[in-house]
Image (cartoon, coloured by chain):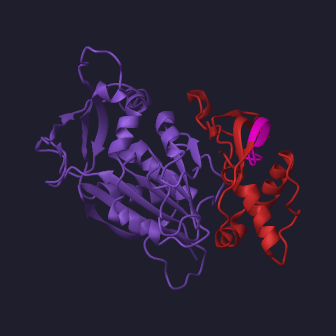
Chain colours: A red, B purple
Amino acid sequence: MVRLITHNLLACHVGGCNSNNFPLEFKDVQIELREAEFNADFVRAFLPKIAWKALVDTARQLGDTSLPDEQPTMIDDEFLKNLHHVLLEIHVEEGVMICPNCKHNFPISNGIPNMLLAEHEIG
Amino acid sequence: MAPKEVTPAVIDEEPEVYENRNVHMIYDDIASHFSSTRYKPWPIIANFISSIPVGWIGLDSGTGNGKYLPLPLDRPGELWTIGLDRSINLLKIARTAGSSGMVREVVWGNVLDNAWRPDAFDYAISIATIHHLATHDRRRKAIERLIQAVATNHGRVLIYVWAIEQDELSKRKIPTVEDGHDGHGKDVVVPWVFSTQLRKTSQSAPEKPQTFNRYYHMFAKGELSGLVAEAARELGLKLGPKPESSKESVEGLEIIQNGWERSNYYVELKRWTI
């Protein structure tokens, strides 16, 4: 991992960086696609919590165009499966997440994002 | 097995530096041995996670080897718990926690940071983590972060910390000194004996077992609830159950349950708005 379900929650927390600090932008990524068991109930119930534009934009950044700009009014199985794939099957193994505001780099290594800040960045 | 001798700790440097030496570096050194001794979920924690509805997403703040990430075992995939920890070596184990081979979501970070967008999580658990923080303020701040991480109108939090009062099943023997019952808790170091035979080295000469001394703040009765009250005050939340009605909009925090179980103090919280 890290997958988009997590990325949709992460924000920049450098001291003083309080606006336009979400979502973080991926750069130089190495992706692996791995199947995950599809649980329609989870995806349907989780849907309202998603920061939708951030998810769609990020998925497109990573080459997946299966999601619509807006959440559909009629939720069908195909939509849920596409959403499941975007949230849980795209693993960013290596790369960097960059804050659009302050440009801080959060590296990803072996699928684990590093959100630690240096002493002076905590603010 | 004879109880381990626990000795008083003296925090003689900046808390971050002290924690780094007496908590973080040690966990990275003992990660795999530590992980093999931490596998049994405790009942109140297992029940809390079992009560989480489908579609909820949660934070395990101080996930260690990730033993809570696969729960609940009878409904895998119905909720997602993301593990946060300071030890990269423990996270590498947490990444595939559980016997199903499922990959978990883990993040390398500090429980004192707020690296999440607002209202990110539905629930948060902090099990045996904040007792590794070296000052009262840092322990309170960690609780603030848990409350901040969860949804303002329904977020649930469960916190577990080591208690001064240990039961007879405990492997730790806390020296009885007159203080510590004034609500302030006790700073101690607890030895961890790491047998290097576990590393399966090919050296023929027997290695002397290494001892690591981990820092803990053992909580006194009422101390955890006290920290929760302070955290609520810092965040401007009204402490208490949600009222029937209100003239103005209020954000609050209710203590659902609190108590002592198996040498730990615990508290369960719920956020509300009106």
Task: Give residue B168's position: percent from left, percent from top.
Answer: 13, 54
Q: Is residue B72 left or right of residue B115?
A: left
- Outermost residue on the bottom side: it is B244
At 14% across and 42% down in the image, what residue appears?
A: B1
In depth, the one of B93 and B270 nearer the eye is B93
Specify whether residue A89 is painted magenta: no
Q: Quadrant of residue B14?
A: top left
Q: Is residue A117 left or right of residue B47?
A: right
In depth, the one of A46 and B180 nearer the eye is A46
How many dots with numbers? 0
Magenta span of residues? A19-31
Task: Give residue B246's position: percent from left, percent from top.
Answer: 56, 81
Can you say whether A18 is above or below B199 in the image? below
At 24% across and 24% down in the image, what residue appears?
A: B209
Can you say whether B70 is above or below B95 in the image? below
Specify whether residue A22 is painted magenta: yes
Task: Give residue B203's position: percent from left, percent from top.
Answer: 32, 15
Q: Quadrant of residue A15?
A: top right
